[in-house]
Image: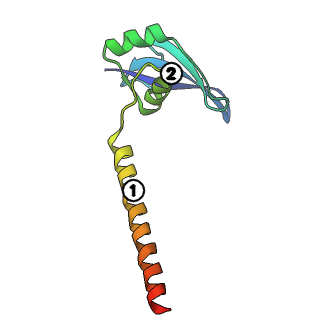
Amino acid sequence: MIKLRLKRFGKKKEASFRIVACNSTSRRDGRPLQELGFYNPRTKETRLDTEALRIRLTQGAQPTDVVRTLLEKGGLLEKKVRPSIAIGKANLEKEKIAKAKSKESESANKEAES
């Protein structure tokens, strides 16, 4: 299976990444099949070879999570609501509702006491 992943390069503690297509069993910094872009997390600079990426995606290449978010920001993929994100948002909504109810009950108790 072909994966779209990040390949690290650069100095110590100043990493930059190349977006590459490689076999899923190969090493992170091994020889890639094709280099498809560049990402610098310090400056948030991203360069994508859109034609080559589209070809690889139509061939069935699977992007990793980080590469997927970069492609979504670049407009090559549609944003998907991932289950973990949806569950997290649902839990946040439940917590907000519970806090609001507890505040209402506390204010009602204070008014009843006075």
As displayed, is residue 35 above or below residue 88? above
Q: Is residue 113 above or below residue 33?
A: below
> From what the image shows, is residue 96 above or below residue 43?
below
CA neighbours of label 2 inside 10 A, class few (<14), some (14 to 19), many (20+) = some
The correct choice, above or below, for 111 with respect to 37 in the image is below
Residue marked by disc 2: 74
Q: At 38% from the left edge and 9% from the top edge, which residue is drawn?
A: 55
Residue 28 visible within the image: no
Amino acid carrying mark 2 in the image: Gly
89 left or right of 19 in image:
left
**Residue most toward the bottom?**
113
- How far across and how far down the image is residue 38, in percent? 57, 19
Element at badge 1? helix
Task: Please report whichever mark, 1 or 2, sits nearer to the chain's N-terminal start.
Answer: 2
Tell me the tag on residue 93: 1
Nearer to us in this view, 75 or 24: 75
* Mark number displayed over residue 13: none
Residue 86 makes an appearance in the image: yes
Cα gap from disc 1 to disc 2, whole angstroms = 30 Å
| Callout 1 crowding tier (Cα within 10 Å): few <14, some 14–19, many ≥20 | few
Q: How many marks?
A: 2
Image location of residue 99, percent across then percent down? 43, 68
Q: Nearer the viewer, residue 101 or 8?
A: 101
**Amino acid type, callout 1:** Glu
85 or 47: which is nearer to us? 85
Residue located 44% across and 85% down the image: 109
Residue 23 is drawn in which quadrant? top left
- The picture places residue 61, in percent across and down from the top left corner, at 35, 18
Q: Quadrant of the N terminus?
A: top left
Q: Secondary structure at mark 2?
A: helix
